[in-house]
Amino acid sequence: MTKSLSEIYTSLPEAQDPGAATPDAVAQADFNARHWSSPVPGPLRPGSAEHKKAVADMFRDTFNPYKPSVIEWPKLDPDTLRRVTSLPVWDIAVQTEGKARLRMAAYARLVEDPDMKDALSRNAWEENRHKEVLANMVAAYGIPLASEPPYIEPRDVEWAYMVTGFSECVDSFFAFGLFAIARKSAFFPPALIETFEPVMQEECRHILLFANWLAWYRATLPLWRRPWFELRVLGVWLFLLYERIGMVTTFDADGNKHQQDNNFTVHGTKDVANVDVPLRDMLDMCLIENERRFAGYDSRLLRPKLAPNLARFLRFFLRRTPNSAMLESQPGAA
């Protein structure tokens, strides 16, 4: 029987007793979260029982049992604190995680297959944990936030789930590169960067799950339903393109109007580094980091392809920057 979202976490010994998490246990949990292979030989064909079970097993076995409530946020000097609090991302980050947990939990309730239901329920729970991490960080550093709007369950649950999933695939690809640039530039203290590292790797797992859910769902749909589903997928991409053309207008719980930038992960290098990073170098960093984060998972599982392929296409039209400081010492850098 599928466990509830709270049972998924509280049933783990490490979650019940954070003090039991020794440095060796933390290192092992981190390793396990990044490496997984199915023992089943041969191809994992989308739509097959072997593929479906591998996807669910991967997501369950790579769970990292860290607790947001025991994260020790590093003390920041005044300049660093100012840089952190001035980043234009915190409102939309908190609200995005709030919407994601609701949409994924709502969709998981509709899924009848027990393996996929379990994986998607765990995904919803982890989105809620991301929101807790952000909420605790905001409180620790005194970052002002707009009051959150009410989170309303969507009428079209499948559409909302796909909007969130495809959006995460794009945002995570660029966030991987942005995060690496922030680490290499030393614009923020290493302790703060490392505190967020498990969250970044979880985003990799999330979009790995979504890519394989999408392939599984397509393969198991009756033939007569597939054309309509593909039209909906196209509609989701058109909606996301429209959403990201400019600033998105939202209203907080008090009815105040806010303009939010949904493209920070694409052009936010100036806010996380103390050097200019050319667009080609940014794309290269995203490609390198995307490959690195997925490298430990079974290569037979599908990866999101659109954002990496678009980045490879765009970089051919951009001027190469010789001896890029950002790309030095990066594995696979060209």
Image (cartoon, rainbow, N blue to C red):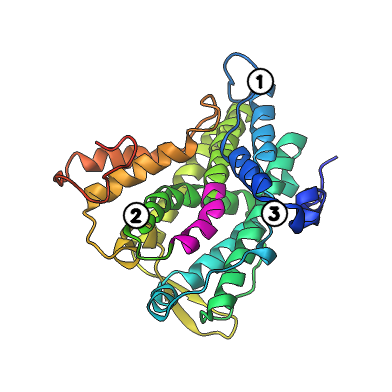
Q: Report which residue position mark 3 lands on.
A: 125
Q: Is mark 3 on a helix, strand or loop?
A: helix
Residue 37 part of the magenta segment: no
Residue at image x 64%, y 40%?
62
| Image location of residue 126, percent across then percent down | 65, 53
Question: Spatial distance from mark 1 to mark 2, Cα to Cα?
Answer: 36 Å
Q: Which of marks 1 and 2 is in front?
A: 2
Q: Report which residue position mark 1 lands on.
A: 39
Q: What is the magenta range?
A: 190-202
Residue 192 part of the magenta segment: yes
Q: Is residue 219 above or below residue 271?
A: above
Q: Are marks 1 and 2 in contact (CB under 8 Å)?
A: no
Type of amino acid at the residue the image marks with label 1 = Pro
Relative depth, front residue between 263 and 174: 174
Which mark sits nearer the N-terminus, 1 or 2?
A: 1
Type of amino acid at the residue the image marks with label 3 = Trp
* Residue 225 figure quarter: top right
Q: Is residue 114 above or below residue 64?
A: above
Q: Nearer the viewer, mark 3 or mark 1?
A: 1
Number of dots carrying numbers? 3
Residue at image x 54%, y 63%?
96
Is residue 65 rendered to the left or right of residue 80?
A: right
Is residue 278 rendered to the left or right of residue 34?
A: left
